[in-house]
Amino acid sequence: VLLILMGGLQTISAQKTEFGIKGGYNLSNLSTDLSGMKDKSGFHLGGFLEYRVSDKFSIQPELLYSLEGGKYSISYSESNEDGDFVFKAKENVTLGFVNLPITAKYYLIDRFSLETGIQIGYLVSGKSDYEFYFDTDGEITSNSGEENIRDDVKSFNTSLNFGLGFELKNKIIFQARYNLGLANLDKSEDTIEDQDYLGKVKSKGFLFSIG
């Protein structure tokens, strides 16, 4: 798609190409059937091109490294005639993606733009930091650690992006973007028929950039 766009834009005399770098803060999460999911902080860093088709419209492909994921915690206790039971668990999932967003930008005014596009991501790393605690009538079992989950997560992700952008006269840019994942990232659904407590696992989150 990018090659076709580049070839077509070469015929437009109004085209202006600019290069830049950008980075910023991620506030991401994972959409699952579990309750107790929480946002996770991360970052993104990379570069972009902007093909200015006209005064009002441009195409901006980017190449970004992005740390995403989500956090999960649960606490449950019960007392009945069989005794007392306490269960606590926490998990912090960190996913490292190389993302290729291709964004269409429409300039409402001179330097203020509305942005939307599609993003393809490739997973390069996956890590889970976890801890859990069981207490059954005073018999305690607990554990914590770190696990590589790269092989449990699908390699490719696709997303839709929506956002706003503003450019200063000195070429500094600010962007706020919402990323909505479309692909199910949980590889276990393909191999384990009865493992459906997670449901579909999809990425989502906000990106705040300066470049």
Image (spheres, helix red, strand yellow):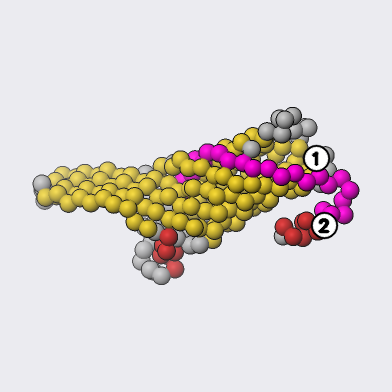
Which residue position holds label 2? 8
Which residue is pictured at 48% across the width and 48% down the height?
68
In the rendered image, residue 49, in percent from the top left (x then y), is placed at: 71, 47
Q: Is residue 75 visible?
A: yes
Q: Does 132 sit left or right of 159 as displayed?
A: left
In the rendered image, residue 167, in percent from the top left (x then y), is placed at: 70, 33
Q: Nearer the viewer, mark 1 or mark 2?
A: 2
Instruction: Judge whether 135 appears above or below 2 on screen.
Output: above
Which residue is pictured at 49% across the width and 40% down the height?
27
Quick one: quadrant of the N terminus? bottom right
Based on the picture, tell me whether residue 13 belongs to the magenta stretch: yes
Which residue position holds label 1? 56
Q: Is residue 83 visible?
A: no
Q: Does 201 sit left or right of 143 as displayed?
A: right
SS under mark 1: loop
Which residue is pictured at 82% across the width and 39% down the height?
55
Instruction: Judge whether 142 appears above or below 210 on screen.
Output: below
Q: Does 18 sit left or right of 63 as displayed?
A: right
Nearer-the-camera pick, 10 or 104: 10
Mark 1 / mark 2, whichever is N-terminal: 2
Count the labels in the image.
Answer: 2
User: For the magenta stretch, what is the residue range?
Assistant: 9-30
In the rendered image, residue 41, in percent from the top left (x then y), is placed at: 46, 40
